[in-house]
Image: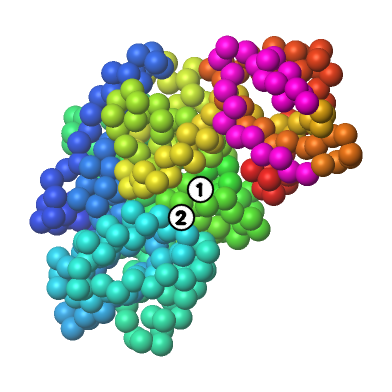
């Protein structure tokens, strides 16, 4: 009987039909920043710009080997698994039906169509991945097609392990630490299972978004649980429930090995990698790099590999990424200003702005009294400390205001 390590190696060899190993590249910028030897496993440079092609291809390859007459595959995906399945469907000449949430970025939908061509049909349903998953599984059982899970499948897990196979071969040795993102757990389960045999001394760190911490919840409960609420901004890793098969392989993970990345901070990392390195990463693809700041003391002087898991970024989202990044960095704030309804009041307010302060939004909401009105202000500046000076001047001149930047309830209504 073959071992998981042997199967992962076979899957890696089979993948050479589609593409060469994705690059493992030392990043000088990050290495200098963290005083460490930082390498990036560039899964954003695969044919579908994510690692998901690996698992989809391996699962489809093994299914067709066992059942040559299988001609229809079904999957659910927030984007990257869909592209992998579409690519594999065209490669094997089979038909695929792909369910995607309505909220999936258009860039991922269009790329899925491009990769699959006439071999796929896309169905948009549900607001989050788990709703699309339910619809896909019902459709699959009614039709008798074969369902390809994005993560909770042994053959998919085995295919994702090929990232670890390539990584060790390319580096020529075991790194001190591997940092990788977690969504449904397929990548983490595959890589950790392979490394447990091939390089057991590597320290593993898993990163998941704060608004989709299904792995943390599963470890706390001792089993996969469904999150009551989900922030879908990091769409490639925002899964409400970790897979059962993936959890079985990850259940021995110590909670300290799991890091949480705030969505707005991830935006800072996306912009940093774009501006400094010219590397385009989607939110999930930036998770492992973003988490380095949380373990900076631990990794100093060590060799660390970060899996840049995907680069399917829709540039129509760039304004939102910039907005989130500025709010996290403290260089943009939203205020509710109580402005006197008298001639010259607005001019008086504008006069107290600093030389680096810029009004990005100005909107009258309503008059709270005959002599006052409420204004929504969006103010950008270059340094977060500029706001302390601005607020002091506003109070000195008698302007009443409320900072609603981090007030989620009010912000959802007025921003």
Return the residue nearer the eye: 409 or 85.
Answer: 409
Residue at 16% across, 79% down: 68
Q: Quadrant of residue 285?
A: top left
Q: Position of residue 336 (x, y in %)?
A: 74, 34
Binning the other alpha carbons within 10 Å of mark 1 as few (below 14), some (14 to 19) or many (20 upward) gives some
Q: Is residue 287 left or right of residue 324?
A: left
Task: Identify the coloring.
Answer: rainbow
Q: How many discs appear?
A: 2
Residue at 22% across, 33% down: 24
Element on which disc 2 rests:
loop
Q: Position of residue 164 (x, y in %)?
A: 28, 42
| Residue 233: mark in rendering | 1
- Residue 196 visible? The answer is no
Return the residue nearer the eye: 347 or 30.
Answer: 347
Residue at 40% across, 55% down: 105
The N terminus lies in quadrant: bottom left
Element on which disc 1 rests:
loop
Residue that mark 2 sits on: 184
Q: Is residue 111 left or right of residue 361?
A: left
Magenta stretch encompasses residue 83? no
- Residue 213 visible? The answer is yes
Q: Position of residue 65 (x, y in %)?
A: 17, 73
Q: Position of residue 312 (x, y in %)?
A: 33, 47
Q: Is residue 114 above or below residue 38?
A: below
Mark 2 or mark 1, which is nearer the start of the sequence? 2
Return the residue nearer the eye: 150 or 254.
Answer: 150
Magenta segment, which residues?
Answer: 343-366
Do callouts 1 and 2 mark residues in contact (Cβ within 8 Å)? no
Residue at 33% across, 54% down: 107
Q: Is residue 134 above or below residue 346?
A: below
The C terminus lies in quadrant: top right
Q: Is residue 390 left or right of residue 46?
A: right
């Amino acid at each position: 009987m073959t071992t998981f390590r042997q199967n992962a190696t076979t899957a890696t060899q089979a993948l050479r039909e589609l593409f060469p190993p994705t690059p493992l590249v030392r990043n000088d910028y990050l290495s200098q920043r963290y005083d460490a030897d930082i390498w990036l496993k560039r899964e954003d440079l695969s044919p579908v710009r994510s690692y998901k092609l690996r698992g989809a291809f391996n699962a489809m390859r093994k299914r067709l080997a066992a059942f040559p007459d299988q001609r229809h595959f079904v999957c659910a995906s927030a984007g990257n698994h869909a592209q992998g399945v579409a690519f594999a469907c065209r490669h094997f000449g089979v038909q695929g039906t792909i369910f995607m949430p309505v909220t999936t970025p258009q860039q991922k939908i269009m790329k899925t169509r491009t990769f699959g061509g006439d071999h796929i049909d896309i169905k948009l349903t549900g607001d989050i991945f788990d709703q699309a998953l339910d619809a896909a599984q019902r459709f699959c059982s009614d039709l008798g097609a074969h369902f390809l899970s994005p993560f909770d499948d042994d053959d998919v897990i085995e295919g994702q392990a090929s990232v670890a196979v390539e990584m060790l071969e390319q580096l020529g040795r075991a790194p001190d630490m591997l940092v990788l993102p977690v969504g449904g757990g397929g990548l983490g389960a595959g890589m950790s299972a392979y490394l447990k045999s091939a390089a057991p001394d590597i320290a593993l760190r898993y990163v998941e978004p704060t608004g989709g911490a299904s792995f943390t919840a599963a470890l706390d409960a001792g089993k996969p649980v469904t999150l009551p609420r989900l922030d879908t901004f990091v769409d490639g890793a925002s899964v409400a429930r970790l897979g059962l098969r993936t959890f079985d392989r990850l259940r021995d993970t110590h909670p300290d090995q799991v890091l949480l990345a705030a969505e707005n901070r991830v935006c800072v990392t996306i912009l940093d990698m774009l501006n400094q390195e010219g590397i385009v990463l989607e939110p999930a693809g930036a998770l492992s790099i973003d988490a380095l700041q949380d373990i900076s003391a631990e990794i100093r002087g060590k060799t660390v590999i970060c899996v840049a898991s995907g680069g399917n970024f829709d540039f129509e989202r760039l304004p939102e990424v910039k907005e989130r990044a500025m709010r996290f960095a403290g260089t943009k704030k939203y205020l509710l200003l109580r402005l006197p309804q008298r001639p010259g009041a607005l001019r008086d307010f504008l006069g107290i702005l600093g030389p680096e302060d810029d009004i990005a939004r100005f909107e009258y909401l309503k008059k709270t009294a005959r002599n006052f009105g409420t204004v929504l202000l969006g103010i950008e500046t270059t340094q977060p400390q500029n706001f302390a000076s601005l607020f002091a001047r506003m109070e000195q001149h008698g302007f009443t205001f409320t900072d609603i930047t981090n007030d989620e309830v009010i912000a959802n209504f007025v921003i």
